[in-house]
Structures are given as structure tokens and as C-alpha cells.
Image (cartoon, grey):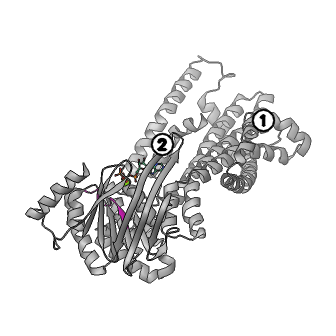
């Protein structure tokens, strides 16, 4: 279901790579809707149709954003979040991909692990936070653990799937043309698994980002999620909104950069 | 066995077993092909042409009987045979030229490989597309690249499964003529599966006619016509009529 949501966004974002005129058109189209909302919202706020305390006007939010941006406060929190994300995501990549390749190659292994995996997958990463805090302390480790938990399954499962879904007809071509086992792995198995692995990476990354913000809401003294907690305790709705927008924008940018990397790495892949 | 028999099948049978039952694809096939001979195999869809070719390629084991290549029992694929599959089967992540060079690079060295790739691409009229990825090619273009890949492999025998069927009439007859030229120059053995009787008559020295359920060889016909062949001669037309009748 998350994958589906993403597909739509992707189409908008990847088309930015096409030529200039189209890119402008696409950006305009993409921005038109939020811009309309913001304008209506601003008017509603100025005319006093909504309570400023519940819903501050966009211009007020932007003021807060500027102040926080210039003072470096926003940057500091964003950096804290992104650092955790990178640590956690790297750990996932280092473990989930090789493990996925191994499991994918061992035919019957999945019958033993699949039920367990689907059980673990049903548990939202945030539900583990109290336990992770108990085990790993209140510092960084528990948040990194949440990230690893959130991204491990999509990356691992898509790697397994990638290794399993190698087209047997292409493997047969390798056999008929006497390719060495080394060439079979490097030129057939790995390239055909790469597409699927990338799908996993992108899903994993967006899972990470959401889980991380959740973790920071519960237990952190820095980070974008913490900013929301702070805004709540200090009764500053402006701060909360700045944090929410930052989360959305940063998440989209993360996904876009992975999508770009994918394009660079796989020039053979047709745009969908 | 005569010394220059390259391919020899003795009483070969093949039965496939699947969940819903078993299919006898080939029964009691006796077939031989001499060195530098050009043989076509024709027959209705499902009569076992591809299966026969795959046994010679070493991709399928016969259920009964024995298959020999160059006097040795066929145990698997080899450097002496190259297959053009019924579908192009190019690697989507490699460009046209890399698809062709992948199997030969380590043996031939990069300079020789470069030469061969250029030559075979010219032959199939695909030189302009050497840097293209398979998704950028039409079906017929992809199939031509697959032909080029097999030619570049420089095998003793070319095993081709309907290689020209995805092409338009003009391109097809142009490539057929070029292919005849190439064959006469290189003296390579060719076994060609086709459902196009005219193609078989234009190209080959012998036509093997197969009938279905189970696949058997009904007749092997020598084509005594000189190259290049003319479709409008009486002999050609008579042969075509005859084969058409035997297939049905
Ligand atoms: N791997 C397989 N598993 C099961 N049955 C198979 C397999 N390959 C071929 N067959 C069966 O063997 C028979 C012959 O198939 P084959 O592909 O050799 O036919 P063909 O003469 O090449 O047909 P076409 O002209 O349509 O390509 C068919 O009945 C098919 O169902
Ligand atoms: Mg066939």
C-alpha cells in the first residue's frame, strides 16, 4: 500500500529529469494544488475565520521557519535526525542485502523464516521503543535500532525476491554461451536482482524516516520529531508546523535522491 | 558413423512431465547433419522443433535414444554450438555491443572482439544501435542482435529457432540473402527451425518435415536447386506445394 502511494509521487519527481520545458510544466502542476490551499488558508487566517492558536497562518509559520533556520536551530535538529537515519540505514544495508542474497539462493529457507518475518513485520517499529530503551539505553542506540527494524524487512524481502526472480531464460542464455560462474553472478544474477533491491531500499528509507520521527517524538532531546514535542510542551503551534513541513519535504528529497541514484546505476531501466 | 557427420540423433525421444500430465514431444527421431550443411526443420506449431534444437544445443536431455555432436555424446552446451532462441533473450542491462561481446571477450581479447562485434553488427544492419539498450529496440531489431551474438560466437554449428520470423518481408529477404552469402563464405553448419516453407526452400540444402503429437520426422527432402534461389521457378513452386501438403 505504501508502494502504491509512492508510485504516483515518483512519476512526478522522476519526470524532472526530462527536458527543461517539461520540467517547468511538471513543477508548476505539482505546486498548483498546495499553493491554492496555502493562499486560501492565508486569507482565512487574516480574515479571522480560523483561530490563530489552532491554525497559525502560513506567513506566521514561515516567519518561525526563517527565525529557526537563521538561528541554526532547524539545521541542528535536521542534522541530528539525518545522522541517525544514515547510521541505521547503513546497518540495514550491510546486513539485509547479503542475508537476502543467501536466503534467496537457499531454496527452502524461506519456508522456515517467512511466518516469523510476517509476524515481526506486523509490529510497528515504535511499539518496540520502550524495550529498545530498556536494552540499549536512552541515547542514540535505541533510535538507530528502530530505524534498522523499520527498514530491514523491505530491503531484505526485496533482495530475496530479486535473487529468486532471475529470469531462467536469461540464465539459460548464459549456459548456452558457456559463461563462467563468475560472469553468471556478475552479469546475470546481480544485475537482475538490483532492480528489486532498489525498490526495497526506497521503501526501507521511507519507512525509516517515518519510524525515526516517531521515535524522536517519544524519546529524544534533539531531532525533527523532538521539535514537535517541544512545540507541544511550549504551546507553539508554529514550531510544530515547521517541523511537520520539514519532515515531509526532507522525506521527499531523500526519496528523490535515491531515485536519481537508481537512474544513474541502471540506465537500462525504462521509465514507467 | 561417417567422419564428417557433425550432428547425429539416434532414436531420440523426449517426454515432458508436468503437473497436469505428460507430453510426448518427440518420438523416435533419427537425424543427421553433415559438416557445413544447411538444414531446415519445418512443421506445425507444437510439433517439437524447438525441443529437437534444444537437444542438439545440450539444453535438454533426451528421455530415450542418444545425441552426438562431432562424434561425442552431447552432455551440455559447448563452444562449438551457438543458439538463436525463439525470443531474442538479450540482457536488458547490457548495450547491444556488450550483449554480443560478453560471451567472447575473455577468449578473443578486446581488440579482436571489437572487430568481430563491428562485423556482425554490420551484417545484421544494426551498426547504428551498438550503444542502445534492448528496451530501445523493436522486436525484429532485438532478434537481429541475437543473430549477431550467435555469429560472433563463431561456432561450428549455428542452431537457429525461427530467427527471421519477427522481421518485415523486405528486411527478412535481405537478411536471408546476406545469410546465404555468409554461410557459403564461412562454410558453417546451420540448423534452422522455421514455420515458413519458402524460407526453408530459399536457404537450405535439406528440409526436414516434422509432424505433431508426438513429434516425428516424416520426411527429409533434398533441395537440388542452385543458389541464389528464385521463388518463381516451377521447381520451387512444386516443392513448396509438396511440403505444404506433407505438413498438413
Ligand atoms: N519445458 C517443457 N515442459 C513441458 N512441455 C513442454 C516443454 N517444452 C515443450 N513442451 C511441449 O512439447 C511440445 C513441443 O514443443 P516445442 O516447443 O518443441 O514445439 P515447436 O515445434 O517449437 O512449436 P512452435 O512452432 O510453436 O515454436 C509441445 O506440446 C509443448 O507443450
Ligand atoms: Mg518453437
- The magenta stretch is B159-167
Q: Residue at x 41, y 78 (%)?
A: B114
Q: Is residue B45 above or below residue B82?
A: above
* Residue B52 sits in quarter: bottom left
Along the viewing direction, whichever of B124 and B93 lies nearer the viewer: B124
Tag 1, which chain?
Answer: A
Q: Residue at x 58, y 59 (%)?
A: A189
Instruction: Specify the quarter for ligand 2.
Output: bottom left
How crowded is the residue under tag 2: few (<14 C-alpha within 10 Å), some, or many (20+)?
A: few
Quick one: quadrant of the C terminus of chain A?
top left
Q: Dot 1 lies on which element?
A: helix
Which residue is disc 1 drawn over? A126
Which residue is disc 2 drawn over? A11
Along the viewing direction, whichever of B185 and A57 lies nearer the viewer: B185
Residue A194: x, y in percent? 58, 55
- Of callouts 2 and 1, which one flags the residue occurring earlier in the amino acid sequence? 2
Along the viewing direction, whichever of B134 and B22 lies nearer the viewer: B22
Q: Is residue A207 above or below residue B244?
A: above
Q: Is residue A71 visible?
A: no
Disc number for residue B188: none
Quick one: quadrant of the N terminus of chain A?
top right
Is residue B199 inside the magenta stretch? no
Amino acid at each position: 500500500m505504501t508502494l502504491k502511494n509512492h508510485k504516483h509521487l515518483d512519476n512526478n519527481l522522476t519526470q524532472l529529469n526530462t527536458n527543461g520545458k517539461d520540467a517547468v510544466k511538471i513543477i508548476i502542476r505539482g505546486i498548483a494544488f498546495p499553493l491554492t490551499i496555502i493562499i486560501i488558508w492565508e486569507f482565512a487566517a487574516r480574515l479571522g475565520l480560523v483561530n490563530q492558536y489552532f491554525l497559525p497562518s502560513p506567513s506566521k509559520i514561515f516567519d518561525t521557519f526563517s527565525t529557526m533556520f537563521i538561528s541554526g536551530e532547524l539545521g541542528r535538529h535536521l542534522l541530528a535526525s539525518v545522522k541517525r537515519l544514515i547510521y541505521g540505514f547503513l546497518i540495514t544495508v550491510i546486513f539485509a542485502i547479503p542475508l537476502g542474497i543467501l536466503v534467496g539462493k537457499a531454496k527452502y529457507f524461506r519456508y522456515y523464516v517467512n511466518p516469523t518475518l510476517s509476524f515481526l513485520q506486523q509490529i510497528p517499529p515504535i511499539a518496540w521503543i520502550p524495550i529498545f530503551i530498556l536494552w540499549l539505553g536512552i541515547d542514540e542506540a535505541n533510535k538507530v535500532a528502530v530505524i534498522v527494524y523499520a527498514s530491514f524487512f523491505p530491503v531484505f524481502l526485496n533482495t530475496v525476491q530479486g535473487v529468486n526472480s532471475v529470469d531462467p531464460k536469461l540464465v539459460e542464455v548464459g549456459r548456452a554461451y558457456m559463461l563462467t560462474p563468475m560472469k553468471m553472478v556478475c552479469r546475470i544474477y546481480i544485475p537482475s536482482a538490483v532492480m528489486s533491491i532498489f525498490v526495497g531500499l526506497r521503501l526501507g528509507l521511507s519507512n525509516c524516516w517515518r519510524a525515526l520521527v516517531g521515535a524522536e517524538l517519544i524519546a529524544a532531546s534533539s531531532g525533527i520529531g523532538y521539535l514537535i514535542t517541544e512545540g507541544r510542551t511550549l504551546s507553539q503551534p508554529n514550531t510544530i508546523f515547521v517541523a511537520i513541513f520539514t519532515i515531509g519535504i526532507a522525506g521527499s528529497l531523500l526519496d528523490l535522491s535515491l531515485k536519481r541514484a537508481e537512474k544513474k546505476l541502471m540506465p537500462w531501466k525504462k521509465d514507467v | 558413423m561417417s567422419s564428417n557427420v557433425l550432428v547425429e540423433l539416434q532414436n531420440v525421444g523426449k517426454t515432458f512431465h508436468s503437473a497436469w500430465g505428460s507430453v510426448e514431444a518427440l518420438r523416435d527421431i533419427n537425424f543427421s547433419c553433415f559438416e557445413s550443411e544447411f538444414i531446415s526443420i519445418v512443421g506445425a506449431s507444437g510439433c517439437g522443433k524447438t525441443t529437437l534444437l534444444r537437444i542438439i544445443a545440450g539444453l535438454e536431455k533426451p528421455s530415450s535414444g542418444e545425441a552426438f555432436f562431432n562424434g561425442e555424446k552431447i552432455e551440455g552446451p559447448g563452444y562449438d554450438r551457438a543458439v538463436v532462441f525463439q525470443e531474442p533473450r538479450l540482457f536488458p542491462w547490457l548495450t547491444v555491443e556488450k550483449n554480443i561481446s560478453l560471451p567472447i571477450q575473455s577468449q578473443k581479447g578486446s581488440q579482436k572482439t571489437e572487430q568481430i562485434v563491428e562485423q556482425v553488427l554490420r551484417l545484421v544492419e544494426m551498426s547504428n544501435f551498438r550503444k542502445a539498450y534492448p528496451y530501445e529496440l523493436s522486436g525484429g531489431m532485438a532478434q537481429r542482435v541475437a543473430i549477431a551474438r550467435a555469429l560472433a560466437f563463431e561456432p561450428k554449428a549455428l542452431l537457429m529457432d525461427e530467427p527471421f520470423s519477427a522481421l518485415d518481408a523486405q528486411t527478412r529477404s535481405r537478411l536471408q540473402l546476406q545469410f546465404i552469402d555468409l554461410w557459403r563464405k564461412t562454410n558453417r553448419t546451420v540448423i534452422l527451425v522455421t514455420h515458413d516453407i519458402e524460407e526453408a526452400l530459399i536457404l537450405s540444402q535439406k528440409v526436414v518435415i516434422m509432424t505433431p503429437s508426438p513429434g516425428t520426422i516424416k520426411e527429409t527432402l533434398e533441395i537440388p536447386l542452385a543458389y541464389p534461389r528464385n521463388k518463381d521457378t516451377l521447381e520451387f513452386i512444386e516443392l513448396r506445394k509438396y511440403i505444404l501438403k506433407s505438413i498438413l
